[in-house]
Image (spheres, rainbow, N blue to C red):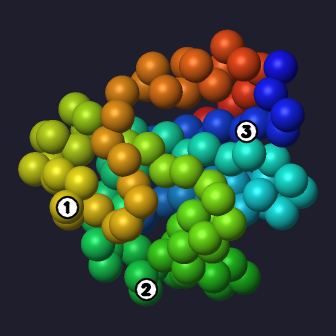
Amino acid sequence: MPDKRMLVVVITCGLDDEKMSVAWSIANGGISTGLDVTVFLTASAVDCVRKGAADKVHLNPLDPTIGAMMNNLTSRGGKIYVCPPCAGVRGYTEADLIDGVVITGSGVIHELFKEGAAALTF
């Protein structure tokens, strides 16, 4: 069993959906409460980590921008992974994405689930 409780947040919605803001808010809340947080992006959610794409996106006026929430998460140790086919169909490589984001298959989160991670999907 890992030393720290883990949370995996899977995001599938795009930058035009308020659920994206909710997902990042919950992921940051997990970091704040001491969870080891991993975010896995699929479908149109991968657009949020393209450099500059989310810097000014403000889906909920009570939340920071999506870009600020992503930066907050990664600056405190949260990890962000992107589905390879979802990035590929958009022509994205890791060079197109914000620093620290890794394109990798779902096996990375399956391993976390095997270690007891909880999952939330948006």
Q: Nearer the viewer, residue 95 or 63?
A: 95
Q: CA distance from mark 3 to mark 1?
A: 27 Å
Left-right relation of 33 to 11: right
Left-right relation of 32 to 50: right
The quarter of the picture where the N terminus appears is: top right
Q: Quadrant of residue 7?
A: top right
Residue lying furthest right:
33
The quarter of the picture where the C terminus appears is: top right
At mark 2, the secondary structure is: loop
User: Measuring 77% from the left and 58% from the top, which residue is drawn there?
Assistant: 31
Left-right relation of 83 to 25: left
Task: Check if mark 2's residue and mark 3's residue have beta carbons within 8 Å.
Answer: no
Q: Amino acid type of disc 1?
A: Ala
At mark 1, the secondary structure is: helix
Q: Which residue position holds label 2?
A: 56
Q: Earlier in the sequence, mark 2 or mark 1?
A: 2
Q: Which residue position holds label 1?
A: 95
Left-right relation of 93 to 8: left
Q: Which residue position holds label 3?
A: 7
The picture places residue 8, in percent across and down from the top left corner, at 65, 37
User: Measuring 31% from the left and 79% from the top, which residue is drawn there?
Assistant: 52
Residue lying furthest top:
114
